[in-house]
Image (cartoon, helix red, strand yellow):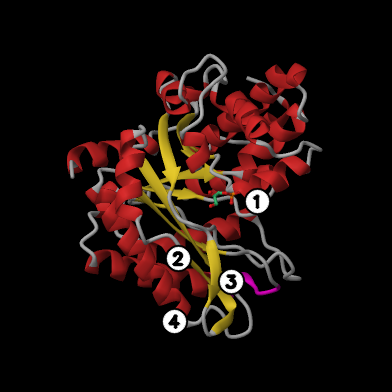
Amino acid sequence: MNLDAMTQTARALVAPGKGILAADESGPTIAKRLAGIGVESTEQTRQAYREILFTTAGIGDAISGVILFDETLRQQAADGTPFPEVLRRRDVIPGIKVDGGTKPLAGFPDEVITEGLDGLRDRLTEYAALGARFAKWRAVLRIGDGCPTTTCIEAHAHALARYAALAQEAGLVPIVEPEVLMDGSHDIARCAEVTVMTLRAVYAELARHRVVLEATLLKPNMVLPGKDCPVQVSDDEIADATVAALRQTVPAAVPGIVFLSGGQTDEQATSRLDALNRRGPQPWELSFSFGRALQAPVLKAWAGDDGNRAAAQAALLHRAHLNGAARHGMYTADMEGVRV
Ligand code: 13P
């Protein structure tokens, strides 16, 4: 375990003005995204789409790291360069999703647990050899009647801590991702309560498992009202509630918090990240690790047609730069129409 190198990597991932691109969709999820633009998901189309993302000129100016899926970590660009090397040459740090996705939590029909701890030590060693420098594990918590239960929160916290300790043992910076979903009709106060409960449990377990917080990143949800809640609130209220929840729970030793977008539109995610960064200095960097909120405009521009490659890459760069501006609290909606 080289803690200095891992701590440096964690800090580089949240360098000012930059953030992470989550391109680690599993087979079924990428199939859904590609189906949305009328493209069949095959190994070839997945490679072609991800090559467009990773070979974007200037990507390293606004993207610090990319989270890859197992298949993608092993794929190459058309010229034979392995994807991790394609990224490194552009000053982008390759990372890897290491969880095995969610399965129903036995005995708790409305809740899920994340699988993938068995064999994880060996997979992490292999991923490090393939060039990954950081890892991600996603826990999913749903708000509903009687949900999430303490059992579910504790099971996720335990799995996240086991994963994070193993990742550090292999020299990979663990991104710890407890996602409280925005599905449902709950209000923002309930999301805040569940987010605080979850983060408390997660940091207690990380401490028990001797995870070195300086060499980790947190990837949480923003504190939002449920998608179907009749009372929607302003970006400033969201930023206040989110900062309050994080300040109560996330130790100052954590170098950065990289939000997921979780189904917000790309403009909402950027605007709220901006509001978060306008709240003044915090103990940690407040950055992004967006999947959908970075890729939605790219998929739309590409539409499976190689002739649209340049337009797709321009869309990625534009979105990444807008999020980079939001990291400084300098994003405004009128920048949406202005291409850099
Ligand atoms: P979204 O930003 O689309 O929520 O994806 C981020 C992610 O990596 C979820 O695990």
The residue where tag 4 is placed is: 151
Instruction: Report how many numbered discs are placed on residues in the image.
Output: 4
First in residue order: circle 4 vs circle 2: 4
Q: Is residue 42 among what the camera can see?
A: yes
Disc 1 from disc 3: Cα separation: 20 Å
First in residue order: circle 1 vs circle 2: 1
Disc 4 from disc 1: Cα separation: 28 Å
First in residue order: circle 1 vs circle 3: 1
Residue at 35% x, 56% y is 119
Q: Is mark 4 within 8 Å of ligand 1?
A: no
Q: Nearer the viewer, residue 330 or 149?
A: 149
The residue where tag 3 is placed is: 142
Point out the frontmost of discs 1 and 2: 1
Give the extent of the magenta segment.
185-191
Name the disc covering residue 245, or none: 2
Disc 4 from disc 2: Cα separation: 21 Å
